[in-house]
Image (cartoon, rainbow, N blue to C red):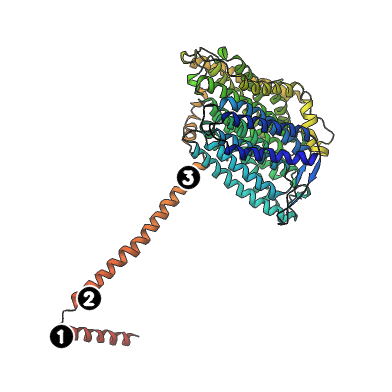
Amino acid sequence: MMVQALLLILIIPLISGVIMFFIPKKERRAQEGLLIIASLANFILAVSLFPQNFTYRLPWLDSGIELSFRLYNFSSFMLLSTAFFGFLIALYSVIFMRGRNFLNQFYGYFLLCIFFSNAVFLSDNLLVLFFFWEGLLLSLFGMIAVGNKEAFKTATKAFIIIGVTDLCMMLGIALTGHLSGTMTLSKINLPLNNPLASITFILLMIGAISKGGAMPFHSWIPDAATDAPLPFMSFVPGAMEKLLGIYFLTRISLDLFQLNAQSGLSTLLMSIGGITIILAVMMALIQKDYKRLLSYHAISQVGYMILGVGTALPAGIVGGLFHMINNALYKSGLFLTAGSVEKQAGTTDLGKLGGLGRVMPVTFGCFLITALAISGVWPFNGFFSKELVYDAAIERGMIFYLAAVVGSFFTAASFLKLGHAAFLGKLSSQNEKTKEAAGAMLIPMIVIAAACVIFGLFNQLPLKYLIQPILGDRLEGHNFSGFPVNITLVVITFVVLFLALANHLFGAKIKGSGLAALDHIRYAPALSKIYDLAEKRLFDPYHWGLGLVNIISKLSLGIDRGINWLSDGLSVRLAYGLSSGIRKAHTGNYSVYLSWSIAGMLIIFVILIIL
């Protein structure tokens, strides 16, 4: 029965996704029905498979590669998480996507994304995992491309950035097979005791953190927030990419390699996490669009996960994994509130919003809970996962703890700005007729907001039954559920959050607007020019790559034109000039010919004498 359920959790989303492309565009109800039924069946199967442990192996096309799937604590937890978000966002999409073009394509790619994600989580062979990993890239491209007129450019950008990092991952997989002598994940456990092993770890790490959306592989996400359909942002960058990226990063750090605290690679991971936290949240501060602001927080929050896993300490790894699922909850919920606002008010431009809390109270309530959760406010889920990351980070170095705490200050500050600008203040005249979203859109938001409360107040449930079993003996007998042990760090957290509130009240008072409450940071003397350059994309590696490609193309064009000039221009002109001169020299005068002969003989004679 378990084998059948495992195969069905792969077959159902795959077949449903393929069928979706062939359903006529006019058959909207058939498309919506198939989407809901397939995502619900996927969720039921994921529940039935949790928390089973078994392996299913099958030779693949007589190639020597095993099509092997392994279900254990970690993979079954990830399947359940994917199925949970997939079903809720499918339900939400049925209402949000009505009236839009290419519905069957979006739903088809959505279901294929679930299939490829399930296959990645279950794969116990690195080559098989990479095959499905690349399939995800194709479904990601398709889901973005069906957005607005600029969506294809953004989809291409995402494809190039992730594709390049996947090449690094592919090389890392080849080196892993070379070092271990096998491609079976459950049989690999390599020490990081030589340069080649370290290089292999880094190559695989690049693939993992790129999928998670960490810097510097992040720049397609804010563009997708503007161009792609909103359910895509809630499902893929908000939840799925983080689950996949951190899942693989954790497998690399715990299973494939023996990552130790105090090692250089551990410090590298923590540094990437800290930099991602700070730089992304600083960009979130200055955004004037609801969705773009959330997109930068989607990037920033993955920094906490990388930082936690990078500590290589039980508290940090548990905190990073707990933050992974917590972030998927509140980030999906926040994007769903953005979609509710976009659907009802017709815009996500914060300058055109305001006072929506009066006419959209349920959406506002869900926003408030998820915003408090992402800001790390007690007693919501984000508070507990962040405190675990803080505890491990400070043990590894004060600089990493400070990066995490400063990130929390700016996170809270930016969500105070967002909430004030969108939901508080005076209701604009253009939004006077705005009403609350439909029930099918509200239910997923309410469920996710409730989960943020439950995972906070009763954090022992997810930690005991979902997170801590993944580490097994590595827990060293510790139980990280309940209220944080380090009260000093908790007090500092409360102080930081209070300072963020005071900063917002100060900024809103001097500027007279919630939207402009952080302008004193944006236009600070030390930051203003940096922000100007950032908004011009001068710090975007993709922008650098385009500039380099442009230089190379111009140089290549110049070389090509130069070769054409030499072959088709200069040589022709020289030949023409020489032949023309020879023709003019042939006058038919014998005395002239005799003079040439005598002159030639003299030249030959002189040369012979010299030699």
CA gap, disc 1 and disc 2 = 17 Å
| 92 is higher (above) or lower (below) than 218 | above
Q: Quadrant of the C terminus?
A: bottom left
Q: Residues within 10 Å of mark 2 (few under 14, many from 20)?
A: few
Q: Residues within 10 Å of mark 3 (few under 14, many from 20)?
A: few
Label 3 SS: helix
| 501 is higher (above) or lower (below) than 62 | above
Residue 292: percent from left, percent from top? 54, 29
For disc 2, the marked residue is: 582
Q: Quadrant of the N terminus?
A: top right
For disc 1, the marked residue is: 591
Residue 331: percent from left, percent from top? 63, 28
The mark that comes first in sequence, 3 or 2, is: 3
The mark that comes first in sequence, 1 or 3, is: 3
Label 2 SS: helix
Q: Decide if residue 153 is on the left or right side of residue 254.
A: left
The amino acid type of the residue labelled 3 equals Leu
For disc 3, the marked residue is: 546
